[in-house]
Image (spheres, rainbow, N blue to C red):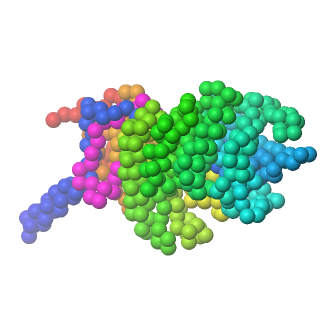
Amino acid sequence: MMKKMIVLMFLMTSLLCKSQPRLNVTWSERLMISRSTATLQVVGNPMLRPQAPMRQGSLNALRALGADYVRYVPWFPYPKLAVAELEPPTSTSTSWDFTLIDPMTSDFFEYTKGHSIIFNFSTIPQWMFKTPEKVQYPADPNQVAWGYAGGRELRDTTMKELTDYYVRLISWYTKGGFVDELGKFHKSGHNYKIPYLEILNEPDLEHSMSVQMYTRIYDAMVTALRPILPGTQFMGLAIAYTGGKAGWFEYFLNPANHKSGIPLDWISYHCYANANSQQKFDAYEYSVFDKAESFINTVGYIENIRKRVAPATRTDINELGTFVSEEMRNQPIPTTYWNLSASVYAYFFIELTKLGIDVIGESQLVGFPTQFPDVSLINYQTNQPNARYWVLKLIKDNLPPGTELVKTDIDANTGDDILAQAFIDRGVKKLLILNKRNKPVNMKLSAECNGAVIYRIDSVSADREATKSLVSNEITELNPFAVNLIVLPKNPPMISN
């Protein structure tokens, strides 16, 4: 009887070892050098206004992150915070007013000082579009106005009215002021530098533009703005949905569809891996990762177009996030969701880095109930960074451009529960590992990881920065939706045969 028990235990142990996912890294097999920068976008909204409860904690987090290519977008749902000329000029007056816009914008420049930024005042004044009647906007700047982006056809088809507006707006921030339509000088005192300027936001949704219409606007705005922005690079497209949009990329990236001399420095586009309508949270781990994987396949297709048509153009995927269902958005979001969303960003970073994407931007610094709470990097209840922020910071601080990717695989990774990628950062070996599932998963590491530092962002770290410990066992546990970074010692222990 005892002999049978021993045999049974041996068989169970063998089966466990065989099914145990094992991380294998061939450090000598260098695959590529990363060109990817991890960063975020900042959307102007009421919680970044002076005295708003989320303002200071959010700005402190932004400064502490110290990211480059930070995207700044005052957005149409809050017209008074995004549009500097809300009424059309008359023969006797203009409505230029930066009183509510300047504090947030100046904060953005101050708290990103020393780092590159992408500037995008994306909202065209509504009065520039033909509409059956005037589109109203709320008197309260904090009140959301989803209907402000109506109209599909500009009233001035020459686009001079449009470009004049943007020349004046950009001059306000870079040239100390501007002369308005009536010859009056408006002094700002601002002389900010704008290294990157993005033209509009999600034109496939906002005003439902065609790619031909958007390209005409891009050309007109770049032509008008280049004289006042010497050295600035321009970014185009910023489309919301890439599915079925191959024609957008084929058309926009083709220099033949632009005026002579128009630069195609950058393209940008977005992805939110969303849950399905009325889906329970237990199923999110499958739906959001499936949609993230589908997006990666789309990016590969877009990259083939870019390399063929405009190989010198760079790519910024500057809105990456996850959405809960509409039903859940009106309820308290489960705390585990933030770790799931953080894990999805780590997945995006690994896969987009492999595809050579230049900038990988998480969306967004501040969200709150009624304004996409599910994409916030700041906990809107405590005003402190959440797991999405801490994963971004962990990646940004440890895996900069120039890091080498080496061959990495996982044996017995049943269902692809785990994704891992090994990097060499200036001679230091690092492993980024994420758990896609809402359950703990054990992984077997190689002996060279003994004594390595392991940083964990999971349900234990919650809204705090990564916990830190040393690897002392070849089996490491990844908590549900965990993102772990292992930093190997420069002089690993000798392994005896």
Work out whether residue 148 can be spotted.
no
Q: Residue at x 18, y 59 (%)?
A: 15
Q: Residue at x 76, y 37 (%)?
A: 168
Quadrant position of the C terminus in the picture = top left
Queried whether the magenta region covers residue 407, the answer comes back as: yes
Work out whether residue 162 can be spotted.
yes
Residue 387 locus on image (x, y percent): 52, 52
Residue 379 position by quadrant: bottom right
57 with respect to 438 (left or right): right
Q: Which residue lies furthest to the front in this view?
A: 158
Residue 136 position by quadrant: bottom right
Q: Residue furthest bottom?
A: 278
Q: Which residue is drawn at 55% across and 48% down?
A: 212
Q: In this view, does 360 lie above or below 424?
A: below
What is the span of residues highlighted in magenta in the rendered image?
A: 400-419
Queried whether the magenta region covers residue 256, the answer comes back as: no
Of the pair 476 and 360, the residue shown nearer to us = 360
349 with respect to 239 (left or right): left
Residue 40 locus on image (x, y percent): 56, 44
Q: Which residue lies furthest to the right in this view?
A: 92
Quadrant position of the N terminus in the picture = bottom left
Of the pair 302 and 34, the residue shown nearer to us = 302
Residue 237 locus on image (x, y percent): 54, 45
Residue 332 position by quadrant: bottom right
81 with respect to 215 (left or right): right
Mark count: 0
Q: Residue at x 47, y 58 (%)?
A: 273
Residue 36 locus on image (x, y percent): 45, 37
